[in-house]
Image (spheres, rainbow, N blue to C red):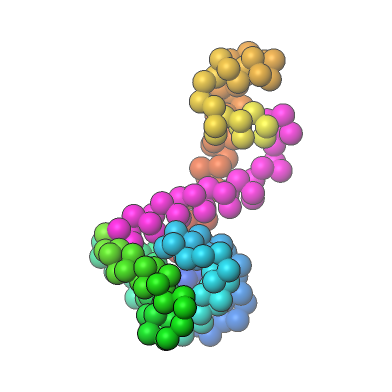
Amino acid sequence: MEKKYNTRQTLLSKIVQADDDHSWEEFVQYYQGYIYAVIRNLGVKQELIEDLLQDVLLKIWKSLPNYEYRKGECTFRTWLCLVIKSIVYNYFRKKSTRNDAKNTDYDATLHSLDAITEPEINIIAEKEWKIYVSNLAWNNVKDEFPQRCREIFEASIHEANNEILAKRFDITESSVRVYKSRVKKVLLREMSRLNHDLGA
């Protein structure tokens, strides 16, 4: 796993440059969890997220061939989150204009969506992406480590104090540091690979 990242074609470029069903399936596999998290972050109730997720994926499938990366202007994640916000906003706008008993809920959600600015969308995009890629990377690499090493690393996410961790696992503090460092190195490398390959 040396620095092959620069020579590999990103998932986004594969989709943009060719009508490739396999690449689209790969995109859905990797991105639907992230899209789900962003929709939830916009205050959408659980029972509505799945339908909105499908609407967002359909819109992206139609729009992605026209997506053009402009360095320094708008990251793909921000573009994606703007698309998500637009789909969610339009959904609640249509619902709020209908004469039914749930209008108050729809109007309240619409009002809160209206208040989200583009800089705030960017913050949501970055925050959710970091969480999503970290979890995805950990799922990809965790089986490379012995169970004890995994347990210590996972415990260290919630407890930063090495002395406490050493007592809990009955090992030395230096061993805790070694375990954490070993995992962190592999995890960061995998996060870097994912960030490149997903073209985000």
Residue 143, image x and y in percent? 71, 43
Horizontally, residue 187 falls left or right of residue 114, namely right
Quadrant of the frame with the C terminus: bottom left
- Front-most of residues 9 and 115: 115
- Front-most of residues 118 and 75: 118
The residue located at (61%, 35%) in the rendering is 154
Q: Can residue 183 be seen in this view?
A: yes
The residue located at (51%, 79%) in the rendering is 55
Q: For residue 142: magenta?
A: yes
Q: In which quarter of the image is residue 94?
A: bottom left
Residue 138, image x and y in percent? 60, 46
Main secondary structure found in the magenta portion: helix
- Front-most of residues 105 and 189: 105
Q: For residue 15: magenta?
A: no
Q: Quadrant of residue 105?
A: bottom left
The residue range painted magenta reads 120-149
